Amino acid sequence: MKYAVLATWKMALEGTRKAAALLKEGEHSGRAIVEGITMVEDEPSFHSVGFGGRPNAEGRVFLDGGYMDGDTLHFGAVGSIENFRSAVRIAYSLQEGDANNFLVGEGAERYAEEHGFEKRDNVTEEAMELYMKEKDRLQELSAYDGHDTVCFLALDQNGTLCAATSTSGLFMKQPGRVGDTPLPGVGYYADSKVGAAAATGMGEEIMKGALSYAAIRMMKDGMSAQEAAETAVFELDRELKERNGHANPMSLIVLAKDGSCGIGTNVSFTWCYASDTEEAAVHEITLP
Ligand code: GLY
């Protein structure tokens, strides 16, 4: 395969198409997926990312995002930032240098402001209506309600694998709460010698298994993308059920260095894939 792109959820279809078109022109995988994710962040009808994202318990939208380059293993990440257009663009810019790659809260916002990143109030009328309707039912809400992270993985024509993520996190999350999405090794990982992986679902569960790195480690030991994705999710799901009696939803996408992909999930899940031999399309696993 010359190039390939894999992304979480059907909301990523247009972004997947865009990233694939850029990869076809020879673009770097990292720049291609940042463009793809930004399209999702800009669309207010997608309720778990960027503009129109789900508000926290105080009715404010805070964003998390991460990025990793599989050639250098450099990563950049931001957690709990408010009033910026694109968490992933800021994360991408933080990959340079050996320190200060992961910024949160006020420090991340100051960095973004100083570096000229576009600002935006991400609270839409629709998101606020939902917040007003649900705010008194906080105890009844499922932890999983409305927090689908957008994750993109890509392989470019030079063999570079990259991973990127963006989310507004859990609906009604506590102020200051950060999930798996900006955490390298947990929400995403990329190693051009092996593969790339990224996770969506309940961040606190995904953290317990460092899910993205777990899959890449399994591929280093010889598993295919599909075997690694399934094994990483099912092993963690089993461990959590044994220890706690239940496991919350989690899904993992994996892209191997040959462009083949793998999906592991303990919940119904959609994803998008495109390559030099396949048009961008939505795929689905439906679980009871
Ligand atoms: N997976 C997104 C979050 O838990 O914040």
Image: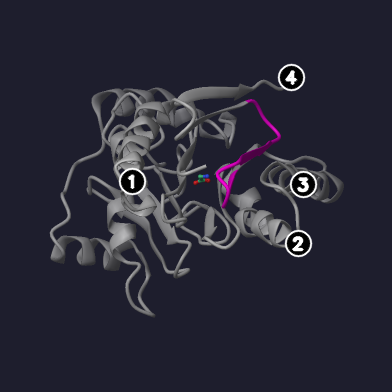
Whether residue 222 sits left or right of residue 52 in the image: it is right
Whether residue 126 sits left or right of residue 256 in the image: it is left
User: Is residue 149 at least partly visible in the picture?
Assistant: no
Q: Which residues are magenta?
A: 254-268
The amino acid beneath tag 2 is: Asp
Whether residue 59 sits left or right of residue 254 in the image: it is left
Q: Earlier in the sequence, mark 4 or mark 2?
A: 2
- Mark 3 lies on residue: 231
Q: Earlier in the sequence, mark 1 or mark 3?
A: 1
The amino acid beneath tag 3 is: Thr
In percent of width and height, residue 149 lies at: 47, 40
As measured in the structure, the alpha-carbon distance from the residue carrying label 1 to the one carrying label 4 is 35 Å
Asked if residue 268 is positioned above or below residue 154 in the image, the reply reads: above
The residue at 35%/75% (across/down) is: 100
- Mark 1 lies on residue: 32
The residue at 20%/41% (across/down) is: 121
Res. 89 mark: none
